[in-house]
Amino acid sequence: MASEKEKDQYDYLFKFIIIGDAGAGKSCLLHQFIENRYKKGSSHTIGVEFGSKIIHVGGRNIKLQIWDTAGQERYRSVTRSYYRGAAGALIVYDITNRDSYNHLVNWLQDARTLARADTSIITVGNKCDMKDKRAVTFLEASRCAQENDILFLETSALTGEGVEDVFIKVARVILNKIEDGLIDPNTMVSGTHTGSQRIGSDSGGEAMSSKTCSC
Amino acid sequence: MEAPARSPGRRVLGPLAARLSNLLGGPEEAPQIPDNVADVRTESLTVAEDAAMHERWQSMLKGRKPSECSDAELRRLVDDGAPLKHRLDLWVLCAYAAVNPAVGYCQGMSFIAAVPLLLAFSEADALAALRYVVEQVCPGYHGASLEGYFCDLGVLDALTSQLLPEVHAELVGLDIPFDIVYFPRALSDSRAACADARDVPTDAAQRFLALARSGISADIDAVLQCTRRFIPLVLGDLGEVDASGRATFLDRLRAQFRDQGAAAADGPSASTALAADGPAKDVAFEPPAVVARVTLDDGREGLLRMGAADVPRAAVQRFLAAYALDEACARPLTEWLTRAEANAEQYPVRIAGKLPEIRRAFGHRRS
């Protein structure tokens, strides 16, 4: 069993932001990813909250530093400053709420202009367990993602379906960019950093260590 | 909307009720606390009771919103009491949005309004408490543009840069938006109080009282407490300070940052703007902290002006831009300004120097 010190070691640190309309399930998505369970009675986010987790992707230990933002319109002026340097962006909408999907383009524009040009973006259709209330089809959202050259997955923060895949998928894309020389992991502004210490051998599963704090 | 039927519940602790009542009661809207608090019939519920109530509502609502129910159905629901969530949503937050549509609903209000409810106050009292906190304690914090928040953020950022430069520099160096540091102390305090309330109501009450009493300015007060001597230096004239030594100073600073707060909605956050450019570079700061006349290499005379809520580095950057000077001059000029201010006995500091000499004197120093 790895010691606490070893658990905290990683090769790269990626900054992720989670954005999207209020009530789309951003915080629950983060909570499901970090804690592997649904956050019942979740309340509105104020400003920003944080979570972090080390995942194992492509033979590397990657620490994800995840910034979960408040979705309400009036908080945008606050949360805009949090985009800077994000290597990955999750734009979450609620598949049962057409409006949250319609606003996707606005969030996408924010992510592209405020984070960095080559931020890896995934759009996440959350609440896919509520099939009978679906207002946005998988095909429609998938096509929209293709047209905008971003990734797409549907998730259920309630059941956990697809949640881990979202984070791993984005991390893998960023890792590929690093290995292709498109992103320099040593630059602060890129939203990626190299870890201070490399673990000698790869051990453990996908999720090695996690912690959360709120702000 | 009719008031919900009341059901027997917990009793409010007398001293606590009185304190909260005194605190929250404005001249026109004092919460109705009877003289004999033992007679108060409240709707305070334990977590288990609230959960049971919530389940009852869920089973009756069948996935609908309360607004989608008929009046008769609503009456049946309400007559047996409402769970905390719906009491908050229906009778406090919706009511507030109706009372003050200009502010409406802002995420985070529920954390403020839930505390009085958890402490067994009525919805009317919770609404009065919410109005007091939102409109009196934190004016402008919850409006559409959060202008009050940005204004105070600018003030606190400037104060920190002036009074705790090491801390400020570290935050800037780490590229951390200043409001991340500020948020937990500002808006989230009420949330923390709410989260704790279910377990330790008295502790939550104390924290809520502290928030209501001193509000967001507690942070600023803390900075000022540590640096009391700084106030007359900035103001230049002690006579302008009010009896508490605080209001005039804060009002002045807030006025300086008000415009910047409004502008934040269209640009980077106030903290980012400050970190990059210093506070509101187009705003003439009164009074100035340092006025420096610099004779440039070509014989021109430049005016380097640093405001009371400004920082040397930002002032120098503006100066370099205004006179198209080389970045290499930044460090010596910053050192020069910093040294002059450190040695100042009264503000504003007035100094003069020649750029070649300043470069020679301070160019080799570590910044």
Image: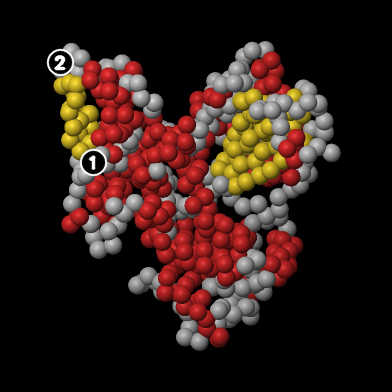
Image position, residue A206 (x, y; %): 79, 33
Identified at 55% across, 25% down, the residue is A188
A94 vs B324: above or below: below
Q: Earlier in the sequence, mark 1 or mark 2?
A: 2
**Circle number at residue B344:** 1
Looking at the rendered structure, whether the residues under marks 1 and 2 are on a common chain is answered as: yes
Q: The residue under label 1 is which amino acid type? A: Ala
Q: Secondary structure at mark 2?
A: loop
Which residue is denoted by mark 2 in the rendering?
B299
Identified at 38% across, 60% down, the residue is B136
Number of residues whose C-alpha sits closer than 10 Å to that of mark 1, classed few (under 14), some (14–19) or many (20 or more)? some
- On the rendered structure, is B255 left or right of B34? left
Q: Tell me which chain the residue with mark 2 is part of.
A: B
Can you see residue B42? Answer: yes
Q: Tell me which chain the residue with mark 1 is part of.
A: B
**Circle number at residue B83:** none
- On the rendered structure, is A45 left or right of B50? left
